[in-house]
Amino acid sequence: MSVESGRGRARRASSRPERRAPGGGASRAELVAELTRLVAPLAAAEGMDLEEVDVRPAGRRRLVRIVVDADGGVSLDDVATLNQAVSARLDETDLMGTAPYVLEVTSPGVDRPLTEPRHWRRAVGRLVRTALADGGQVEGRVVAADDDAVVLEVAGRRRRFGHGELGRGRVQVEFRRAEGTAPADGEASDDELADLGADEAGN
């Protein structure tokens, strides 16, 4: 067994003789579903959300990629701790069979689409572009977000969008952040969300 750490991710490699389950083994979708059920509570116990599980061939091995996130982000220590917990749990099961595999636990990249309220909340302070449900798209900075809505500053004006009005958002890469903007992990302001309706009505 070897554990490698770098750039916010940890990897575990395990080499074993090939073995196939009866009937040809579980499909990729079934394996992903089983892994999701196994990993989700382990991530939650460490204060993280499980964002994605993926399994795909990687040469003669399989790559098991687990993406997690949390308010305030995740550190290398966080992913290493979860990597160890998942590794131990997999060793207790026959889920992966005896085929070689690499386990990778990582955090989302900047290109992760914003599709859940928690994604928008964690993007406070960031410049985003998103499609609108009724057509077109909008680009603005996330000022605040909660389970019901997102407040974007668009061309100097704050606009409130319900999650149902927004498509998949994308964080835009900025080489220089505008002065006075909130940090990316800033907390959403309940007052800003509550007052936005009055603000829009006056504009």
Image (spheres, helix red, strand yellow):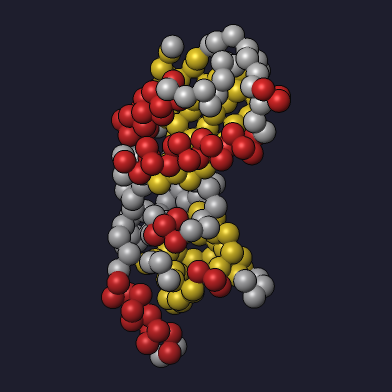
Say if residue 138 shows up in the picture. no
Percent position (x, y) of residue 78?
33, 34
The answer to which quarter of the image holds residue 22 is: top right
**Residue 140 position (above or below residue 198):** above
Look at 54% across and 65% down and name the residue there.
139
The answer to which quarter of the image holds residue 87 is: top left
Give whichever of 158, 33 is nearer the camera.
33
**194 left or right, relative to 33:** left
Percent position (x, y) of residue 184?
36, 53
Look at 53% across and 37% down and name the residue there.
34
**112 left or right, relative to 61:** left
Say if residue 43 shows up in the picture. yes
Give whichever of 45, 203 is nearer the camera.
45
Look at 53% across and 58% down and name the residue there.
115
The answer to which quarter of the image holds residue 147 is: bottom left
**Residue 117 position (above or below residue 175):** below
**Residue 188 position (above or below residue 88):** below
Percent position (x, y) of residue 64?
54, 29
Percent position (x, y) of residue 7?
42, 29
Give whichever of 69, 192 is nearer the camera.
69
> Which quadrant of the rendered structure holds the C terminus?
bottom left
**Residue 178 position (above or below residue 163):** above
Q: Residue furthest front?
A: 22
